[in-house]
Amino acid sequence: MPDTMVATRPDTDNRAAQYDAIVIGGGISGMYMLYRLRELGMTAIVFETGTDVGGTWYWNRYPGARFDSESWTYGYSFSKELMQEWDWKEHFSPQPDTLEYLNLVADKFDLRRDMRFRSTVTAAHWDDAANQWTVTLDGGEQFRSRFLITAIGILSAHTLPAIPGRDSFRGPAYHPARWPHEPVDFRGKRVGIIGTGATAIQAIPEIAKECAQLTVFQRRPNWAAPLHNAKISKQEMEEIKSRYEEIYARCAQTSGWFIHETDRRKTMDVPPAEREAFWEKLYAEPGFGIWMGNFRDILTDETANAEISRFVAKKIRQRVKDPKVADKLIPKDHGFGTRRVPLESDYFEAFNRDNVELVDINETPIERITETGVRTSDRDHVFDILIYATGFDGVTGAFDRIDIRGPGGIRLKDVWADGPRTYLGMQPDRFPNMLMVLGPHTARGNIPRAIEHAVDFQAGLLRFVQQHGYTRVETRAEQVEDWTQTVIKASDALLSSKIDSWQTGVNRNVEGRSVRRVLGYNGHGIHFRRKCEEVIANDYRDFSFR
């Protein structure tokens, strides 16, 4: 390792502690990045706001929280020993089991010794003269590093509703992303939940089983499809372990890094009866098949999308007994799959329960939060517990909450005001030595698969820096422009690009988030991986080094 990268392990009480790399975020991305940085012989520290590892699975402890990737495609693949050691208990793992898994990883590889918890990064400023970053924590402590790596996730900046009186409610109020570590007792309670996005779709059926009354306030319904979760037997888990190499190879060949791949037929080329039978099959199967394994044009052709939307609407009407309630739960402003599709377990059946009420706030708008509950235009709703299931400032929100400044004091938030500018989503334009795991304009999908790919690419880039004695890496303007246009072009054909969602940068609860932006690379995963392989094969010439 060149002398330019050498640093003695510092005392973290030293306000000017020096590292080769500082990583922001102690979730799946930050943990794996730390593992790879150690392999490179670099001194590194991970700063994490929470009290322990886990990221998404540390914060989101609400009832029903689980992922919608098949468990056996979700775990790390870098350690065969780890893969054989861990047994997934369900095909779609619940939050407690996933957090247990990540704690095992942290213990097995002794990651916590280079992680600092209860440490929120508030600022990161580039020092051009010293060729390094100065990182400031919420307590005022400062640390310096040659490289800054963000591992802050695409859905970590949670948002509360912009409703008058929000803080006046006298009872407990929770956001799903800041759920208490101890279970909430809903027995005999009157509960109000604002929002029907992905977290609410998971939480509502579980809360409804316990509480006395659940009132759901909905502005825009979301499409959702059955999860069809099941336990994994010991024998089945052993069989899965024997196929891990095949499973991960499959994920590397699909568009979204999942096991599901698009059917190459066009919707209207298939006879109606055969088409309907195919959709019935997908709807009855576990996972994202109904979204990612569907006909190739359902997300690009309006006629095809109208047909699959009609089918899913029919299934909702079959599952919800009251036709008026069913109609309110069917989206009218976007087609199936044009926003991320939540997978659910008895979500629609929850509205058949006597203790569940759906309030359409387009008909009776929320006027304010009161001391006792929620006031709509027609009456006061009294609650013991309120839940703000109002989502996240997606993709760029977590970056905006850190004062990131590059050469000459330029602010990342200002540079990205009209949309992100990056190369491959790995490094922002005009910010030297700053790398991003799952930054904007990168390929996503099955998150851990995308994380491992990004971390491995960046570790290779850092190894190249070491081998050549460089101290600085940054983007080239022409490559950033070319990649930005590639990302925009990949989104142009998608119906989702015309829809307001966190994936297109729209959030009514965040000031300035009313204009759609292209935030991710929506081309085929294989194309993205090939592009990255070309960059590596060409000795990273698309980047600039000093």
Image (tube, grey):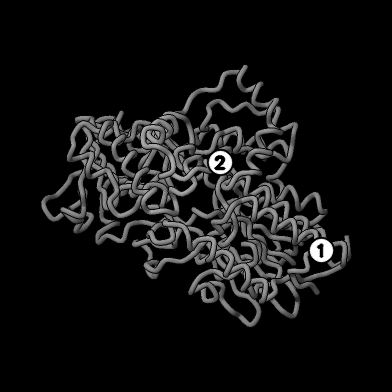
Callout 2 secondary element: loop
Give the residue type that dot 1 points to: Asp
Estimate the x, y position of residue 106 in percent, counting from the top left: 67, 40
Where does label 1 land, which residue? 539
Estimate the x, y position of residue 476 in percent, counting from the top left: 70, 74
Check the image and report above or below for 57 versus 363: above
Quarter of the figure with the C terminus: bottom right
Give the residue type that dot 2 points to: Glu
Estimate the x, y position of residue 531 in percent, counting from the top left: 69, 58
Q: Residues within 10 Å of mark 2 (few under 14, many from 20)?
A: many
Res 435 quadrant in image: bottom right
Where does label 2 land, which residue? 261
Check the image and report above or below for 230 versus 144: above
Q: Residue at x 34, y 62 (%)?
A: 508
Mark closest to the chain's N terminus, 1 or 2: 2
Q: Residues within 10 Å of mark 1 (few under 14, many from 20)?
A: few
Callout 1 secondary element: loop
Left or right of residue 160: residue 37: right
Estimate the x, y position of residue 181 in percent, counting from the top left: 46, 39
Q: Residue at x 61, y 69 (%)?
A: 124
